[in-house]
Image (spheres, grey):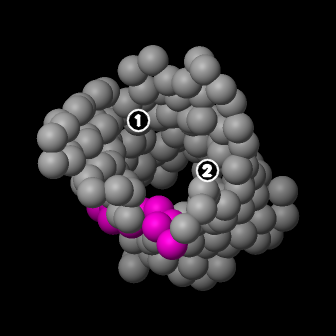
Amino acid sequence: MGPGQPLIFGEGSEHPFWITPKIQLYAGKSMQASVGVMHFLNVGDGNLGIAYLVATKGSTDSAVTAGFGYAYDRTYDNKDDAPVVMFGGEHRISRGVKIMTENYILSGSGIVTGGVRWMGERFSADFAMVVPIDGDSTIAFPLVNVVYSFSR
């Protein structure tokens, strides 16, 4: 479970953020599977997010992740939905630090991220650059994401 937000996003007081509840369904020696939701808040008048299933293969030192989800957007006069594919990876560079990437393919667009993950006993924090790709323009912005693990 964790919150996150872009460090820089437009002007005014409506700074978007998200929450990320996730439940592990399977935990094997080198494979894990989970379901979760990334729900965005403070984004206009709507409810939007991604419900997903994700699987990770590898070790605590290096792993690859793939997932499939369903993006939803519910506003007063709009109800858009779209499938989402996610792929990523991480590699430990020191005891408490990993380099990581999470990338998303949506209908006609995508999101590419890359950054650093600091890890503690129960908390982790990601500092990354995010690049939305929609075909018209590309801009990178910094992001911070904090996660608390209820189990180990």
Reply above or below: 14 against 141: below
Can you see residue 38?
yes
Which sits in the foreground, 50 or 97? Answer: 50
Q: Is residue 36 magenta?
A: no
* Left or right side of 45 for 116: right
* Left or right side of 89 for 20: left
Say what amino acid the circle numbered 2 marks: Ser
Q: Residue 67 carries which label?
A: 1
Mark earlier in primary sequence (1, 2): 2
Say what amino acid the circle numbered 1 marks: Gly
Question: Which residue position is annotated with label 2?
Answer: 59
Reply above or below: 127 against 140: below
Q: Mark 2: which secondary structure?
A: loop
- Dot 2: within a 10 Å radius of its alpha carbon, few (fewer than 14), some, or many (20 or more) residues? some
Residue interval drawn in magenta? 13-24
Q: Mark 1: which secondary structure?
A: strand
